[in-house]
Image: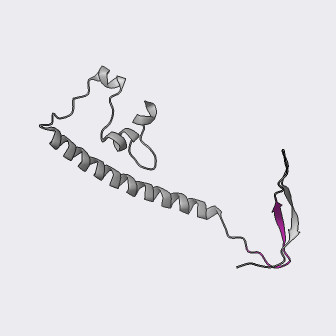
Amino acid sequence: MAYRTATHASTHFTPARLMIGREIRTPIDLVYERPDPEVVESYSTYVRELQENLQVTHEFARKYIEQSFESMRKRYDVDSSACIFNEGDQVWLYNPRKKKGRSVCDLGKDRMLSLNG
């Protein structure tokens, strides 16, 4: 219940809003008697309005996710940097061995022989 009613950081919506197009009623709503939603004239009107609301909500959620992705990418790129290797540099060599049973992969120093692509 708590997860379905919590606003997600990247979408800015609750999972309930994204899935069923409205906020779900919680036990606290029974205590404070939240006003009931509007009464709909017909099922076709309800379905049309629900589809429109879900489309708008999903468009906003996609936009918020893209913004969240960009901010995370920028934050990651600040700390990351490309490694530049030259021939003859010492590098770590990862050489996993395939043995039966449990084994430890080799990780040791080696020299860069040539640069590929």
- Image coordinates of residue 2 in percent, x first then y, are 44, 31
Quadrant where the image shows the C terminus: bottom right
Whether residue 40 is situated above or below residue 117 in the rendered picture: above
Frontmost residue, 32 versus 27: 27
In reply to whether residue 90 is colored magenta, the answer given is yes
In the orientation shown, which residue stands out farthest toward the front?
100
Could you say which is closer to the camera, residue 28 or residue 24? 24
Single out the residue that lies furthest toward the left. 41
In the foreground, 116 or 66:
116
Q: Residue at x 33, y 32 (%)?
A: 24
Query: Relative to residue 31, is residue 76 drawn left or right?
Result: right
Position of 23 relative to 90 (above/below): above
Identify which residue is drawn at 26% across, 23% down: 33
Against 8, is 97 above or below? below
Locate the N terminus by quadrant: top left
Residue 110: % across, % down:
87, 68
Is residue 66 rendered to the left or right of residue 104? left
Q: Is residue 73 magenta?
A: no
For image coordinates 77% across by 79% down, the residue present is: 115
Occupied quadrant, residue 98: bottom right
Q: Is residue 106 above or below residue 15?
A: below
x, y percent for residue 36? 21, 29
**What's the magenta region?**
84-95
Looking at the picture, the colour scheme in use is one colour
